[in-house]
Image (cartoon, rainbow, N blue to C red):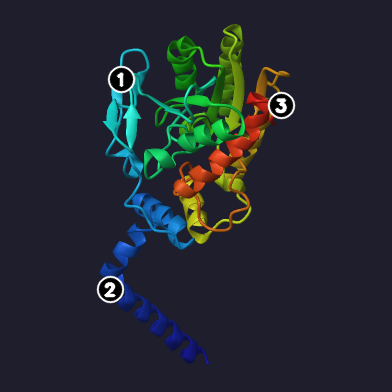
């Protein structure tokens, strides 16, 4: 009996070695596609294919923003580069994007954040959440102009400085901070509790600056993959690749949202929580732990419009 077990183990061992030796080179490409850009690309395309929709060529700025990049800025360090490509980019020399939902807008919304706020991974300009938001609000509430002051890899420290130097002079009626996740993930040299504390300090200061200039504030925590109730297989892979301690990330996000609610003020400072915007979607939405395809942009625009309508136009809301 023992001899048979030993023989069986040898067969398994030699068989596994043979598969790796012969088939190893053939497995390299599929494995690469399940990591990094390969995984992001596959998930992005799957979000269309799973819904039987035509798959666009790719994100307007390329994978990981490679075709757009950033530009040096004397005040802010770096911003989106000026770019004018009809249907894809309208970025001014200050790194800002502006859209209107209807002629003669009566309200001006400023959105501040990082790559998600900047419209990353949308296939074209019209598909970005902020373009769709402008049209939705103009139809449901009142004509609006939306300006986006956001750049990839910014944290709340960058956003606070950008709002102070570039946002306040625009004199918007509302400032929306669509952010949160960069502070929790990129500042990995500090404990999660410290990252949350610093973020909330920056948001408190941004709130006070806004109110001092008669600008109303909306905090909008961005869509959050770890708490998506039903994740696709690709989204599970994305999450496993993105953060080593998901339980700590979830706790930090909950503390962040709780802290933002403590910063609200009646009729002046609001929370439009977008962290669960994709929770009911069983199919793939996220392309990585931050970004999402046109599918997610449309959902986010709808969620923001729903939450902002009673704020911007209470009578209609």
Q: Quadrant of residue 33?
A: bottom left
| Above or below, 208 relative to 52 | above
The reply to whether callout 3 and callout 1 are in contact (CB within 8 Å) is no
- The label nearer to you, 3 versus 2, is 3
The numbered mark, 2 or 1, whose residue comes first in the sequence reads 2
State the separation of the CA atoms marked 2 and 1: 55 Å
Residue 169 can be seen, yes or no: yes
- Residue designated by label 2: 21
- Residue designated by label 1: 93
- Residue designated by label 3: 315
The numbered mark, 3 or 1, whose residue comes first in the sequence reads 1
205 left or right of 167 in image: right
Residue 13 place in picture, x, y as percent:
39, 78
Secondary structure of the residue carrying tag 2 is: helix
Secondary structure of the residue carrying tag 3 is: loop
Residue furthest toward the right? 266
């Amino acid at each position: 009996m023992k001899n048979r077990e030993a023989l069986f183990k040898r067969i398994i061992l030699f068989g596994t070695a043979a598969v790796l030796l012969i088939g190893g080179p053939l497995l390299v490409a599929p494995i690469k596609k399940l990591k990094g850009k390969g995984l992001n690309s596959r998930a992005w395309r799957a979000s269309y294919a799973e819904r039987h929709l035509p798959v666009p060529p790719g994100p307007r700025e390329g994978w990981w923003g490679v075709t757009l990049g950033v530009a040096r800025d004397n005040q802010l360090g770096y911003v989106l580069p000026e770019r004018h490509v009809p249907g894809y980019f309208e970025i001014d020399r200050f790194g800002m994007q502006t859209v209107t939902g209807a002629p003669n807008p009566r309200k001006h919304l400023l959105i501040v954040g990082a790559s998600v706020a900047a419209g990353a991974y949308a296939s074209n300009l019209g598909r970005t959440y902020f373009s769709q938001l402008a049209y939705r609000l103009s139809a449901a509430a009142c004509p609006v102009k939306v300006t986006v002051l956001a750049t990839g890899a910014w944290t709340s420290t960058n956003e606070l400085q950008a709002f102070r130097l570039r946002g306040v002079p625009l004199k918007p009626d509302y400032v929306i901070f669509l952010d949160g996740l960069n502070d929790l993930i990129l500042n990995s040299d500090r404990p999660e509790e410290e990252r949350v504390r610093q973020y909330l300090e920056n948001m408190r200061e941004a709130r006070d600056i806004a109110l001092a200039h008669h600008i109303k504030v909306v905090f909008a925590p961005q869509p959050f993959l770890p708490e998506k109730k039903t994740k696709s297989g690709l989204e599970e892979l994305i999450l496993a690749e993105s953060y080593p301690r998901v339980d700590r990330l979830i706790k930090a996000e909950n503390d962040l949202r709780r802290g933002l609610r403590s910063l609200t003020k009646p009729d002046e400072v609001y929370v439009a929580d977008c962290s669960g915007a994709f929770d009911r979607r069983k199919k793939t939405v996220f392309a990585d732990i931050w970004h999402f395809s046109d599918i997610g942009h449309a959902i986010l625009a709808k969620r923001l419009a729903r939450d902002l309508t009673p704020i911007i136009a209470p009578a209609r809301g």
